[in-house]
Image: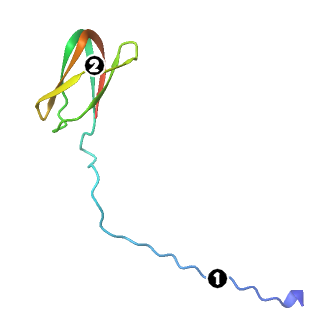
């Protein structure tokens, strides 16, 4: 009887569903900016060209995260004021 067994395999159709969804950022759109402050300063002026009021993570030259006060003279420029002068990098997002 084992040789006469019938094996039934279910057929699972492949269904592709497509629908319009929200548009992401275009490949040409810039979504972040890295600013290097090579000269020690307590006021960093950053021309980021991100067309808005982004935030930033600031690291001094030793890699320590620093906090400052943000202001936005325009949609493409931010100014970060610190309590002391130092060099480092701002990751603007």
Q: Quadrant of residue 45?
A: top left
Q: Which mark is residue 10?
A: 1
Whole-percent x, y for residue 15 in the image: 47, 76
Whole-percent x, y for residue 51 in the image: 15, 38
Q: How crowded is mark 1: few (under 14 residues within 10 Å), some or many (20 or more)?
A: few
- Left-right relation of 85 to 15: left
Q: In which quarter of the image is the C terminus?
A: top left
Q: Quadrant of residue 23?
A: bottom left
Image point (39%, 17%), residue name? 64
Q: In which quarter of the image is residue 85?
A: top left
Whole-percent x, y for residue 74 in the image: 10, 32
Looking at marks 1 and 2 on the same chain, the residue that comes earlier in the sequence is marked by 1
Q: In this view, does 86 lie above or below 7?
A: above
Q: Which colour scheme is used?
A: rainbow
Image point (12%, 35%), residue name? 75
Q: In this view, does 79 lie above or below 23?
A: above
- Left-right relation of 12 to 91: right
Q: Residue 92 carries which label?
A: none
Residue named by callout 2: 36
Image point (53%, 79%), residue name? 13
Q: Quick one: SS at disc 2?
A: strand
Q: In this view, does 8 lie above or below 15?
A: below
> As drawn, which residue projects farthest toward the right?
1
**For the residues marked 1 and 2, what is the alpha-carbon distance in whole angstroms?**
61 Å
């Amino acid at each position: 009887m084992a040789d006469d067994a019938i094996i039934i395999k279910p057929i699972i159709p492949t269904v592709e569903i497509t629908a319009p969804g929200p548009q992401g950022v275009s490949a040409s759109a810039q979504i972040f900016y890295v600013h290097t402050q090579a000269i020690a300063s307590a006021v960093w002026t950053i021309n980021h060209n991100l067309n808005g009021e982004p935030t930033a993570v600031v690291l001094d030259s030793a890699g320590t995260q620093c906090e400052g006060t943000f202001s936005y003279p325009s949609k493409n420029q931010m100014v970060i004021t610190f309590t002391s002068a130092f060099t480092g990098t701002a990751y603007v997002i």
